[in-house]
Image: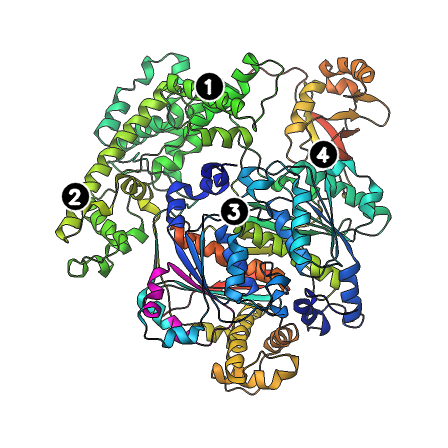
Amino acid sequence: MSDSIDLLSIRPLLDTIGPYNEIPDEYNSKDALNALITSKILVIGAGGLGCEILKNLALTGFKDIHVIDMDTIDISNLNRQFLFGSKDVGKSKAEVAAKFVTQRLNDPNLHITPYFGKIQDKDIEYYKQFSVVVCGLDSVEARRWINATLVSISETSDIIPLIDGGTEGLRGQSRVILPTISSCYECSLDLISPRTTYPVCTIANTPRLPEHCIEWASVIRWPQVFPGQKFDADNPEDVEWMYTSALSRANAFGIDGVTKSLTLGVVKNIIPAIASTNAVIAASCCNEAFKLITNSNPILNNYMTYSGDDSIFTFTFELSKRKTCPVCGIVGISIMAQNWWSLQQFIDEITENKEVQIKQPSLTTGSTYLYLRNPPHLESITKPNLSKKLNTLIKPGDEILVTDPNLPMSLKLIVSFEGPENEPLQ
Amino acid sequence: MLIDKETKYDRQLRLWASTGQSKLENSHICLINATATGCEIIKNLVLPGIGAFTIIDDKKVTISDLSGNFFLTDSDIGKDLATAAKENLNEMNYEVKGYDIIKSIDSILNSEEDDDVSLWDTFNVVIVSDYCCQLDKLKQLLWNKKIPLLIVNTIGFYGSLNLISHETTVIETHQSNKLYDLRIDKPWHELAQLVENTDLDSFNDIDHAHVPSIVIHIKALNAWKRDHDNKPPKTRDERLDFKKHYITTLSRNINLEGNFIEALDSFHRALRPTEIPYSLQELFNNNQIFDENLNLSTPIFWIYIKALKNFVDQNDGLLPLPGSLPDMESDTESFISLKSIYREKAIQDQTLFYEEVIKMLRSLGRYDDEISKDSITTFCKNAQSLHVSYGSDKLYDSSLLQELLSPSPDQTLVNVYFSILAFNTFITEFGKSPSATNIEDFTKIFKNSFGIKEDALSSSLKETIQELLAHSSRSYHNLSSLMGGIASQEVLKLTTAQYIPLDNVFVFDGIHSSSNKWKINS
């Protein structure tokens, strides 16, 4: 087979073995090249990182690339998502991105297969076909889902490495996850900084910052004026209403600084994003994918952070497995419950817990249902448990399994009790 | 469809605001060599809307240029490289002006035509990607003109970036560890008055639990000083005593009053003396603000520093108040009235500082319109965290060479840097890039270039050289894109004049996914 154009820059990396190669006795350049051009690789996300990842993979010899994204193109993407133009606004990111890269490279051997939809639409068999998955996502939920899925595949068949990138402003990180071998995404859930929240009593009674007024408009005023209707941040009328409501509250309290831009930032939880940071992180991820598939050089073990706001700084370290990881760990998470807690109070507590972070939990023990959200008849049977005291439902040391419809895994909690039987008065 | 700029650039305006954006849109950058890395740099600057870019390259597009470069297609083969790259890059954003110059850098530097001589003055930043035959000459020219130069190299899995800049000054550094300047130990008249008029005993329980912690701090510190010879708490015991007997005792129930709990948690604010940061004192001694050195062309940054020094001398050694307050447990009214006291003082200080700057400008025969009220406000808000660094026109200095020669376990990155420098020297001497078969000649050049007398190189250095020559592709796209991302981010920092740029060499090792940086001195 004669080399296609892209391989001119790649061949020198594979033809000669370097001194850092970890498997010098087994390495040969033919296998390396063959692995590169035959491997199926999946890219999740065709946004800021995804556009970069697709370009990088296509220019470094990958020939069978698949890409999933459920989003459509928005004007605010155009400052960094370079595969899209203003004519593409409203179209599928995955489809436009795949088409652009394919046309630009004009290589008959290159195939990029887009899927415009959710990662949850695809089953285990679909994911099993890939040699490696590269993620450029902005959602914690989607990352948890794909991580748990790949760990469960890797427990019974070949390991599918997950390479994950993320950026925020001038900072970012890339990591390589070898499911069941190295730490997984779930292991480091507590590293994710929680979204800024404001106490309800401040929002309701003593606003001081413009953000308090915007939260009031969004959390308190909106449901009163439009009961049962969901706020749509992409609808200009909804945004205008939110902005004017926040502004009038701010004016009433003499608070400065409510702008439309800040309103959008707060209600949409906007994270600043630029092309250069995405380029750095996506390139790091794809460099790892390239080394991994070709065996030409060692791969990142297993986490690199990048920061560009004060000079340039990177830090590389090995993040270790968490024993209590619900996805790849072996022991449950220990929770200390107060004797006076009801099941509801217990649920409120664990949804906030940094190691748990489950939004819609259903709880069972080995022998009984504690609380199930679905199906409806089991919900109605188990609902009365919510007001019962937890220590009447389970014994100290019992294990509780927690599941969430959005996550393909279950968490094991080991509960012990302390404190008085009745809630102490403050 | 009509594209609204504020919506299109929303995600970056949250980083550098409209002031940074307008500086970016008024910047013109120059790329020498339309390499894969060079095109990636331009891509990341065209997207956020830099004013203009110029690509200098006299080569034609060949099939090997296409490999690893997203901005050349097979239909470009045979065209001028600079033109083809410019057109493909410009497609992403037509608000950006793209220019090409089809000349060799050699011919431009040796030309005496006016256009070629004055060319460089149009650029805010110049970037050289990979090998440039006239690098020393170009470097000296730009150094003398005080135009920042970035040199980016990618070879195989390795990359390096030099930022060669006479002087870098930044007002909006965006330092996340910035401390609030609250003047708790030095309240001005209106603030002292407000605290004086806050009679805790007269409040009902609800109001008492909503007194802002700053007011509590000032009351507690005043009381402590009355009892202790007008001195603040210093030792650990004194600080504990301060918390226990001066903050806690003001509370009616320290377990319930959120504002007093907050005052205890943030007691360090009360004990932080108001003073001029050391880094700023150093700037006050900088010879650029000596009277005899100030003139028509003194950068406005140094006019500000001189005016700031005068301001401090005339205002009891205090800086202009930034005026920002942290959020704190409080009712709306108390917080807003406290905030307006800070704001009014900040505005007063800004006005005084503005007058000082105007006076300075006029005395130098300069005009008022060099500055605006907004730029004065920005400066006053950031006066505590300014950044100044002085670069070097050298590619290495004796201490970096020393690091190369005294082997340590963590040496790979310094090895990589010197090997990249030697790689380019090899091209000058042999007219081609070295490969794995040239290891002897390469080693000779390496030793000669850096004056290494020892016969044998360290084993770790040998390994690095071996790796570099084994995988010497200059357009491995992942490294091109990574170094392109990093270099473009430095250009963004330089052109928006926000965040702190590299000072001054960075090296990335894509094998071990690690990096290091050094400061080369003049």
Q: Secondary structure at mark 1?
A: helix
Q: Secondary structure at mark 2?
A: helix
Q: In the displayed structure, does residue B46 sit left or right of residue B350? A: right
Q: Position of residue B35 (x, y in %)?
A: 54, 65
Colouring: rainbow
The residue carrying pointer 3 sits among few (fewer than 14), some (14 to 19) or many (20 or more) residues within 10 Å by Cα, namely: many
Name the chain letter of the residue that bears numbered label 1: A
Q: Nearer the viewer, mark 4 or mark 2?
A: 2
Q: Nearer the viewer, residue A58 or B143?
A: A58
Q: Amino acid at mark 1?
A: Ser
Q: Amino acid at mark 2?
A: Gln
Name the chain letter of the residue that bears numbered label 4: A
> Which residue is denoted by mark 3 in the rendering?
A274
> Which residue is denoted by mark 2 in the rendering?
B314
The circle drawn on residue A245 is 1
User: What distance separates the C-alpha of mark 3 from that of mark 4?
Assistant: 41 Å
Q: Nearer the viewer, residue B153 or A168?
A: B153
Q: Secondary structure at mark 3?
A: loop
